[in-house]
Image: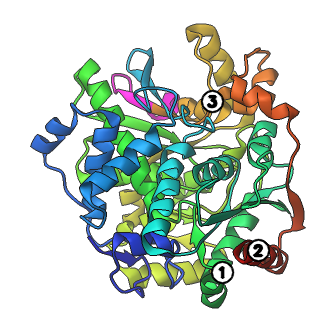
Amino acid sequence: MRYISTRGNVSEIGFIDAVMMGLANDGGLLIPEKIPQIPAERLEALSHMSYQELAFEIISYYVDGEIPEQELKELIEKSYGTFRHPEVTPVQKVKDNMYVLELFHGPTFAFKDVALQFLGNLYSYIAKKTGETINILGATSGDTGASAIEGVRGKEGIRICILHPHGKVSKVQELQMTTVDDESVLNLAIEGTFDDGQRIIKELFADLDFKNKYHLRAINSINFARILAQTVYYFYAYFQVTKETGAKTVNFSVPTGNFGDIFAGYLAKRMGLPVGKLIVATNENNILERFIQDGVYQPGEFHSTFSPSMDIQVASNFERYLYYLLDENSKEVSALMDTFKSQGKIEVSEELLRQVKEDFAAYGVLGEECLQTIKKYHAETSYLLDPHTSCGVAAYEHCNDPGEVCVTLATAHPAKFNESIERCEIQQTYPEQISDLFDKPQYQEVVEATNDDVARKLESHFAKEKAI
């Protein structure tokens, strides 16, 4: 298995090199040269596996022998041994034909743990094998930061810096990141939005001299290993639900801001998993909904919402989908991304829009509907949704036809967003790991959202650490 860039200017590289490169050196995103196809009879065999066994099988298609089998199995066991549920990502039936896939049983109570526990251990494995310096740089709209820090803290040879938008994440999300007292961890609270942080990250990675000098590595979903790890739970959920319902296809409703989680579902479908609809659930920051409805990808006004992890206007993984939408034509992708950079807008033809509508449905959930959905499901089923999962459920109600089986991805534990739960006049009990955070001191630095200000902090952090 070789990896190439969506923009066509990266020579074919192997899996480990793709993980280490993160963002492609030509500014594009790395993708597999070909998507593995899993025949129906193989799917039947996979359906009887544990989560860890399934993860090994799916990931092996993409690692393609670069990591010895036993070592890959140990990596996977180590990554998911930190989860509180024996099934790792259990499926819960909420009502007839309506299920939730609980992705919040990892160390930081968010779906990002599924990918970042694996990526953290993978980076540690690579560092030990190669002696490479690994300085991780990432941006977060809330959950990635804590999951990334938890995934790599204490691992020899790895340092990390995470940018988060100051005052625009939930209190628990902030505490999970900033109560970590570790010299290898730097939290930068930027005076801006997640989109500002994501732009800074991409531009610093695109500065190849800076990237190479400080050995920068990516932890955001621009790193294909993140997408790969997330693809596994679509297979797992499909197998669990079809065993119970007898359904041949399953729809998935996915709360998404950066298009990574839903792209993992798209990848699973391209691999041969019988996925029906892929429903994109957004909030007021609905660039993805507008693209799927109208074929126009253009950032609008930023909104702070009850679902802050989705408060994103520019979705990094959208370029990966664009590559497949344009029939794997990297020149067209590159031209469109240049247009987006210069004009702030991408528009596709009516013919391509028809394909988009075949690939995805979409629904943008406004704040009041998000809260009302939490109230409704708590009253009717006693199941408490976090506000992101609530957006997914509201989108399911809007886009799913009666009789179709649908799984909504439950992306976070409701305790992470108690501000929204309290607005619903619902009292919840914090897990002990979360309640303990409120008594700890915080470690973060507030900086302007500029490349220069962030670069200065990185130079100090990474150079200081290397000298120790």
Marked residue nearer the N-terminal end (1 or 3): 1
Viewer can see residue 365: yes
Q: Is residue 38 left or right of residue 389?
A: left
Q: Is residue 464 above or below residue 261?
A: below
Q: Which residue is mark 1?
A: 214
From the viewer's perspective, is the residue at label 3 or at label 2 nearer? Answer: 2
Name the residue type under label 3.
Answer: His
Mark 3 element type: loop
Q: Quadrant of residue 135?
A: bottom right
Q: Quadrant of residue 8?
A: bottom left
Residue shown at the point (49%, 78%) measured from the top left: 24
Q: Is residue 428 above or below residue 77?
A: above
Q: Is residue 248 left or right of residue 136?
A: left
Q: Which residue is mark 2?
A: 458
Which percent across, then down, holds residue 297? 58, 65
* Residues at discs 3 and 2 in contact (Cβ within 8 Å): no
Q: Which residue is mark 3?
A: 413
* Residues at discs 2 and 1 in contact (Cβ within 8 Å): yes
Q: Residues within 10 Å of mark 2 (few under 14, many from 20)?
A: many
Q: Which residues are magenta?
A: 396-407
